[in-house]
Image (cartoon, grey):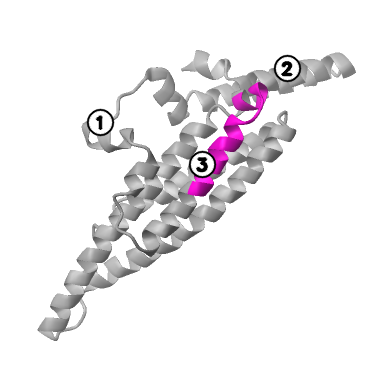
Amino acid sequence: MVRAAALRPLNLVVLAIGLVFFVATLAWWVPPLTLATYAALVFLGARDPFLQSRVLDREEPAVQQPRDLSPERRARWLPRGETRERVDAALAEYRKVVAAVEASDDVTRAVLEDTIPRLQAAADRLVDVALEREKAAKTAGELRDKSASDAGPLDEDLRRLEARVREADADISATSGQFLDLRARVVRISIDRDNAQRVAALNASLDELNARLEALDDIASPTE
């Protein structure tokens, strides 16, 4: 993992920039700063779960086999309606981000090597959330009908479930805009590919998106 992190194109670009700057200026502080930055990037990269998955060739557990299908195909399992329309719109933006990366030059694609797995994970989790949202909405409808027939107050679990459904709706709708923003960032990186901060910010945004979608992944289960 350390060797793979040390040879990542983005990390090597940092070394190259430091070397060029040192040759141009002969500033004594450039080599230690460059090496410290490179070491930090290697340290963080060796703990990157996406890099670990690719390098170690980890197998997905049996319950994850549906992920062998593309998120677009899995989205067809959704019933026709507003949720499916929102998911289709988000996946259309996701495909545009992937296309923007793939249409970049070789150097930019190397710099963004970790972006595609993060994008794919976000698209898969988006579909997971939508599928769970539909199951939760169906369960909430059944509970509401039962409460109405019993002429009793709404169950606390039902209220929580409906709140989670609304939360999932908001996040699914927001994902399209986030993919659109990510596409703009990819274009900026392709123009200024030596800017390591932009690449780090892009991957951080994708990690945040994945974490938020993963938090909603089990939406149908009552929460504490």
For marks 2 and 3, give the CA distance. Answer: 32 Å
The secondary element bearing badge 1 is classed as loop
For residue 1, side relative to residue 196 (left or right): left
Which of the labelled discs sits on residue 95, or is there none?
3
Q: Could you tell me if residue 18 is visible in this image?
A: yes
Q: Magenta residues?
A: 92-109
Q: Is residue 162 magenta?
A: no
Which of the labelled discs sits on residue 16, or is there none?
2
For marks 1 and 2, give the CA distance. Answer: 40 Å
For residue 16, side relative to residue 134 (left or right): right
Which of the labelled discs sits on residue 61, or is there none?
1
Residue at 29% in and 50% down: 77
Type of amino acid under label 1: Pro
Mark 2 burial class by Cα count in 10 Å: few <14, some 14-19, many 20+: few
Type of amino acid under label 3: Arg
Front residue of 43/12: it is 12
Type of amino acid under label 2: Ala
For residue 98, side relative to residue 108 (left or right): left
